[in-house]
Image: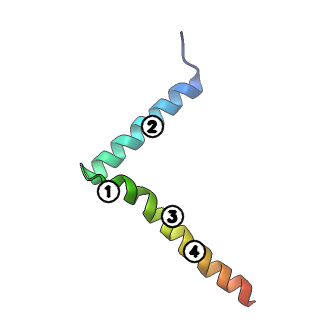
Amino acid sequence: MARSGFEVQKVTVEALFLREIRTRFGKFRLGYLWAILEPSAHLLILLGIFGYIMHRT
């Protein structure tokens, strides 16, 4: 059964993501957690700053 273009693209993106994570963090299990926590922390900080500025004006 042939895969659709979307399925092929999904599998390719997943493989590239896993390769990037393994390359960046090696065998550290916390690397996967860090890959999610760091951008989330940046987002929360920016939301806090913009929320403070918008509330103040």
Residue where numbered disc 4 is placed: 46
Q: Mark 3 to mark 1: distance in Å?
A: 15 Å
Q: Which-is-in-front pick, marks 2 and 3?
A: 3
Position of residue 43 measured from the top left corner of the image (x, y, whole percent) = 55, 68
Q: Mark 4 to mark 1: distance in Å?
A: 24 Å
Classify mark 3: residues with Cα within 10 Å, few (<14), some (14-19) or many (20+). few
Mark closer to the chain start, 4 or 1: 1
Mark closer to the chain start, 2 or 1: 2
Residue at image position (47%, 37%) is: 13
Residues under numbered marks 3 and 1 in contact, where contact means CB atoms less than 8 Å apart: no
Q: In the image, which disc is placed on residue 40?
A: 3
Classify mark 4: residues with Cα within 10 Å, few (<14), some (14-19) or many (20+). few
Q: Which-is-in-front pick, marks 2 and 1?
A: 1
Q: Mark 4 to mark 2: distance in Å?
A: 28 Å
Q: Amino acid at mark 1?
A: Leu
In the rendered image, which quarter contains the C terminus? bottom right
Mark closer to the chain start, 3 or 1: 1
Q: In the image, which disc is placed on residue 30?
A: 1
Residues under numbered marks 4 and 2 in contact, where contact means CB atoms less than 8 Å apart: no
Classify mark 1: residues with Cα within 10 Å, few (<14), some (14-19) or many (20+). few
Q: Mark 2 to mark 3: distance in Å?
A: 20 Å
Q: Mark 2 to mark 1: distance in Å?
A: 19 Å
Q: Amino acid at mark 4?
A: Leu
Residue where numbered disc 2 is placed: 14
Mark closer to the chain start, 3 or 4: 3
Residues under numbered marks 2 and 3 in contact, where contact means CB atoms less than 8 Å apart: no
**For numbered disc 3, what is the local secondary structure?**
helix
